[in-house]
Image (spheres, grey):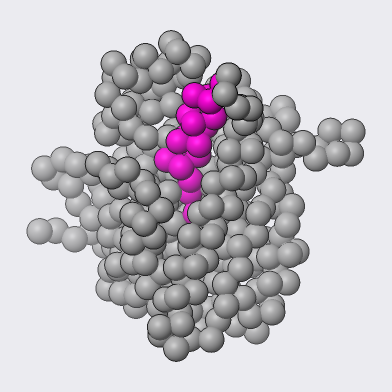
Amino acid sequence: MKPIAVIAIGGNSLTRENERGTFEEQQAHARETCEGIGAVLQKGYRVVVTHGNGPQVGEALLRSERAQGAGTPQHLDVCGAETEGAMGYLLQQTLDNTLYEKGMPQKVVSLITQVIVDADDPAFLRPDKPIGPFYQREEAEQRRDQFGWKVVEDAGRGWRRVVASPHPRRIYEIEAIRACLDAGFVVIAAGGGGIPVVRRAGRLRGSEAVIDKDRCSALMARDLEAELLLFSTGVKHVYLNYGKDDARPLFHVSWAKAHEYLMRGEFPAGSMGPKVEAALAYLEAGGRRALITAPESIGLALGGSEGTEILPPLGVMDETVAVH
């Protein structure tokens, strides 16, 4: 049986700054990522694609809140399900077209995915997950006062709404995902980290929260015993001192060094931090290979000439940092 790769796509990679986020704009950006997914398939992997939905679910929730009085407001978990379906459709169609043009036989399927979380997770008391677009401080504070949001500055890029982000405990549809992989499908699943649900009195129930898609992707890779976990993001490498004059890209970095950098705050919580944290968790649980790179560099990253690779614990390769 072919090895499995889990590819995690950032929601911000589909909706760019200074764009409206139309379906056509997102589809154009998705095409670049789908080229990279094709490169992974050509290497002989079976593929599961996960994706973020921070900008998209924030917009859906804002539309719902603005519709009060004219329509029925939707809960956050329902908005998550709506965006998981819409983005799954966008990615499914774009990837199917890309593979068809390449003469590749794989078909693509999207699965609405529920992810069980702990109802007593302390994250419900400390909302910290950014969703929706970036705002200037004044506009963010206006929305805070109007809608009761909690807002924070996100990685120096602007102000965003934050909501609860409990840890994923179990992917409810994992067996369906595995069955589709075994049947030869490329699977799009756990979009936006999956729909957070809790089980009460034996019944599943949606939760007013979002799940970090990087954490869920690591859980997915662990449960499927995937040999590759790849994060497709807006930069080709993980950087030390990102955004500063002395910024340095990481190429191959040991598990211990990456953990040290994470602990000392090198990777912001609103951007690269969750990816590094998820990669470390996956490798610590027995994963074999974790890569972080931009969509256009996925093929080169697989060959080791681009991107950042975090090595498993006790890996034999030492950290290599480009010096320019």
Quadrant in the picture for residue 237: bottom left
Rendered residue at 23%/55% (across/down): 249
- Going 19% across and 61% down the picture, which residue do you hit? 322
Q: Is residue 222 above or below residue 159?
A: below
Q: Which quadrant of the figure contains the C terminus?
A: bottom left
Taking the image as shown, residue 33 lies to the left or right of residue 204, namely left
Residue 55 lies in magenta, yes or no? yes
Write down the region rendered in magenta: 51-68
Taking 267 as reference, is 120 left or right?
Answer: right
Quadrant of the frame with the N terminus: bottom right
The image position of residue 12, as x and y in percent, is: 37, 47
Residue 293 appears in the rendering:
no
Magenta stretch contains residue 82? no
What residue occupies the far front of the structure in this picture? 70
The rendered magenta stretch, by its main secondary structure, is classed as helix
Q: Say which quarter of the image contains residue 28.
A: bottom left
Q: Position of residue 136 (x, y in %)?
A: 27, 24
Give me the residue at 57% from left, 72% from top: 108
Q: Is residue 89 visible?
A: yes
Percent across and percent down for residue 299 are 34, 75
- For the point 89% across and 33% down, the residue is 201
The furthest residue to the right: 201
Q: Is 13 or 221 nearer to us in this picture? A: 13
Whole-percent x and y of residue 191?
56, 52
Task: Identify whether 300 is placed above or below 147.
Answer: below
- The residue lying toward the viewer, choosing from 72 and 245, is 72
* Residue at the bottom extreme, as displayed: 103
